[in-house]
Image (cartoon, grey):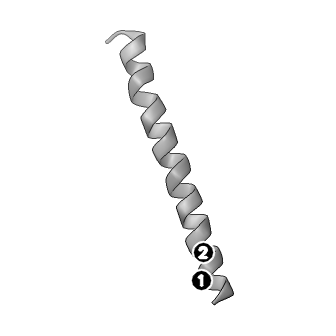
Amino acid sequence: MPRTSMKHVVLPLTWFFLLSCVVALASGLSLNLV
């Protein structure tokens, strides 16, 4: 597998991980505030 395809696979996974972390933090904060 070429390195470029690995890069194209890793980048979306990293963004998905960051977005899920942000959503989890936001939901946790909203639950604590309510």
- In the rendered view, does 28 fall on the left or right side of 20? right
**Rendered image quadrant of residue 7:** top left
Kindly identify the residue that appears in the image at 38 percent across and 28 percent down.
9
SS for dot 2: helix
SS for dot 1: helix
- In the rendered view, does 9 fall on the left or right side of 34? left
**Up-down: is 34 above or below 15?**
below
**Up-down: is 21 above or below 27?**
above
Tell me the tag on residue 16.
Answer: none
Tell me the tag on residue 31.
Answer: 1
Position of residue 29 measured from the top left corner of the image (x, y, whole percent) = 65, 75
Kindly identify the residue that appears in the image at 56 percent across and 73 percent down.
27
State the residue position of label 2.
28
**Labels 1 & 2 near each other (Cβ < 8 A):** yes
At label 1, counting other C-alpha atoms closer than 10 Å, the crowd grade (few under 14, some 14-19, many 20 or more) is few
**Rendered image quadrant of residue 4:** top left
Disc 1 to disc 2, C-alpha distance: 5 Å
**Up-down: is 7 above or below 17?**
above
Position of residue 12 measured from the top left corner of the image (x, y, whole percent) = 43, 35
Amino acid type indicated by mark 2: Gly
Kindly identify the residue that appears in the image at 52 percent across and 52 percent down.
19
Kindly identify the residue that appears in the image at 50 percent across and 56 percent down.
20
**Up-down: is 14 above or below 33?**
above
Of all residues, the one furthest to the left in this rendering is 1
Position of residue 6 measured from the top left corner of the image (x, y, whole percent) = 40, 20
Of all residues, the one furthest to the top in this rendering is 2
Position of residue 34 measured from the top left corner of the image (x, y, whole percent) = 63, 90
Amino acid type indicated by mark 1: Leu
The residue nearer to you, when weighing 1 against 23, is 23
Q: Quadrant of the N terminus?
A: top left
- In the rendered view, does 4 fall on the left or right side of 28? left
